Structures are given as C-alpha cells and as structure tokens.
Image (cartoon, rainbow, N blue to C red):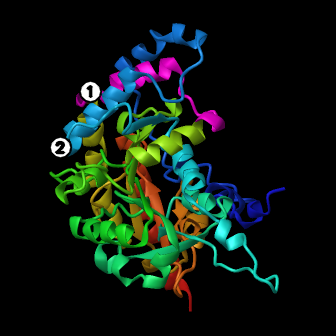
Amino acid sequence: MNPHLDLLHPYPFEKLRQLFAGVTPNADFAPISLGIGEPKHPTPPFIERALTHAMSGLAVYPSTLGGEPLRVAIARWLERRYGVPALDPATAVLPVNGSREALFGIAHCVIDSSGSDSTDSNGKTAGAKPLVVCPNPFYQIYEGAAYLAGAEPYFINSEPSRNFACDYASVPAAVWERTQLLYLCSPGNPTGATVSLDDWKLLFALADRHDFLIAADECYSEIYHTSAAPLGALEAAHKLGRSEGAHPYHRLVVFSSLSKRSNVPGMRSGFVAGDAAVLKKFLLYRTYSGGAMSPPVQAASVAAWGDEEHVQENRNKYREKFHLVTPLLRQVLDVELPDAGFYLWADVRRSGLSDTEFARRLFADYNVTVLPGSYLARSAHGINPGQDRVRMALVAPVDEGLEAAQRIVQFCHALRAEQAKQP
C-alpha cells in the first residue's frame, strides 16, 4: 500500500460521527444540521430541464477536454464576472467534475518530490520534502493532496485581527524556497475571509521569486453579503498586469464550481482556468485519471453559467438568513457577519465549553449539528486556530436556519443557568 495513506487524517465528518457516538438527541426537537456545507436551496428548474433534454449524450464517450460550448460559456462568464480580457476557451479553461477532484489532482501534476528521495553516499536523504502551503483552518483536500503527492503541508494560521486573513508576509523565506504549490481559498472556508489586492501583489512576487504555482479555490465567490463582489484571482492578476503578454496568468490557476453558485452539488460541475501551460499538463494528467464530464451535465452547465438571475436570487436568500441569524447568535457567542461564503465562524468560549463539548451538548440537548472548528485546522506555530470555534453552515431554508439559531440561543442561556447553580 502507498505509505503516504498513513499520513491522512480522518475527515472532519468522521470525527464528528465519532464525537456523537452514543448520544441520543432530544426527541422534542426535529434535527437541524448546520454541519456540512451542502446547499439546500432548490435547483433552478431551467438547469434540470437542460440536463434532461440532453440525455441522448449518454450514448457517447465524453472528451476530457470538454465540449467547446461549455468551455466558451465558462470563459465568457469569467470575463463578465471579473472584467478580464478574453480567455482562450481552447487553452485557458478546463471543465472538471467539481472543484474537489481537481484541487486534489493538481498537486500530483505540480509536485516534484524526486529530489527528496535521493540519497547521499551515507544513505541519508539528500533533500527535504517539497512544501505545499495552505491556510489554517482549511479544506482538508489540500492537506491530503500534499501528502499523497509526496510533499509536506505548511500551514499559515488565519488571524482574527486581520479579519481571519493569513499573514503571508510573516512566512520565512526558507519556507517559500521549498514551496512548490500554494493553496488559498477566497472567500475562505470556514472564515469567509477574502484575499486583498495587496496580498495578491505579494503572492505573485513570491511565486515568481521562488517558482511555485498558486491554486486559488473560489467555489464560494458568488455568495457574498456586501455590495461589492469579492476580488477574484484572475481579476487581481489582471489589475496587476499579469493577464496578457507571452504567458498570461503565469503561475496561477483558479478553481470554481456550480455547486454553491447554482445549488447543483450533485452535478459535480466545475472548472480550472488560468495558466495555459499548466492546464496543458493537467489535461494530460486527467486523460489518465478518467475525469471526463458527461454530456448531459455539460449541457446543464452551459445553461447555468449563462444565467445570473438565479444566482442573485440565491444570494438574496443567504443574505436574508445571515442578517436574521447573526444578530441572534451575537447575543450569546462571539460571531460576526463574514464578508462572503455561507458559514458563520463562531467563538464559543463565552459558553464555558470547548468547541467539541459545545457541539456534542448542542446535538444532545437541542438536536442541532455544528462542526467543531478544531476539526478543520491543525496545530501549527503553537496553536490550533480552530480551537474554541464552531462552523455553522447556513444552508438550510430561512425558517429552519432561524429555528436553529433560536435553539442555540436557548442552549447558551440554559448553560449559563446551569453554571450559575454550580458552587
């Protein structure tokens, strides 16, 4: 067996299952889950129709490159959304089966661990393993991709004082020298933090100096709570003069998906865009891994990328939930409205419980599921930045989300009453 498999941590939801083992939730309450980031808003009917009307496509093998109509639809959406120059659909865009498998696979194309496997005359390893830099907390795919590609993850802790952004300037030069891949998520999971143009300027300079690839995970880009849409990686590259010339978007690839934007997580439809030289190699990799999107899903995806009305309606639903729920929860927890995304990243220390204790007691007493923040992070630089926080995914309908918030408030008040009685 691949020895790197032994380095993988259990997935957060497996840890949650173990945490809840033996717990019987209060039967007086119907279950409400804020634990998993699975959109619960209805899939727009026009996308369903496009899918079913293309069923004849099941009779042919799809191309790994994807059909030209889909690549054109994605390229045109990127141009409209981010105001970037025209992208070549043939070379700068690659459809993928959801961003998850592509985020995982890119590490296997980028990482060269051959130097770390060499030995000197004494039989000792000659070189250190390459590094994959990622935020902490993070989407666990980044870590698994690093390990299974023969690299080591290096975590940069999110900082509450920076609105949960990472301080990339604090990373030692020796780390960047070993870095071959940088994952970042903007808007962030679970914090909602976005990457500023100043940070992008620094990151591009570091990538040029140390020759690493930036993989920008932007699957939450269309859910935001401010008047201005979050800055995208391609948009930042364009503003900084990196979108044209001989090598547009050099050392940058962007990943996105329809799952959150269009409420179609089961379609598994996304894309990678950016550096054409990287995408050429990634296409070669994917022809071997078998990652071709089915023609009916391609047809439905063309329809989805071409429409913005349903996206605005979806965004408005999230905004309604967040503006109702956040003030309620702020009464009992330290939590603020994020810039973007559909998660609340709440500090639970006021409850007197740890993040795991909070999640277990809340599930037992009020049948509401939240995810302990420590499950989404690793101990790095002396702390686990997810400790004493919980992630709440506001994916349920408005009434259900509001009911969950009201139960959490009741739970926290009950805890205070319980603690007041203790000698």
Inter-mark Cα distance, 2 to 1:
17 Å
Type of amino acid at the residue the image marks with label 1: Asp
Relative image position of residue 264 (x, y in whole percent): 45, 32
Q: At numbered mark 1, what does the secondary structure look like: helix, strand or loop?
A: loop
Residue interval drawn in magenta:
287-309
Magenta span dominant secondary structure: helix
Residue drawn at (42%, 46%) of the image = 277
Q: Which residue is drawn at 28% across and 26% down?
A: 306
Relative side of 322 to 21, left or right: left
Q: Where is residue 356 in the image (x, y as percent from the top left)?
A: 59, 70
Q: Is 155 within the magenta?
A: no
Left or right: where 24 falls relative to 173: right
Residue 187, image quadrant = bottom left
Residue 83: image tag: 2
What's under tag 2, amino acid-wise? Gly
Q: In which quarter of the image is the N terminus?
A: bottom right
Count of residue discs:
2
Location of residue 241 in the rendering, given as x and y in whole percent from the top left corner: 19, 57
- The residue sitting at the left extreme is 227
- Where 97 sits versus 7, above or below? above
Which numbered dot is residue 307?
Answer: 1
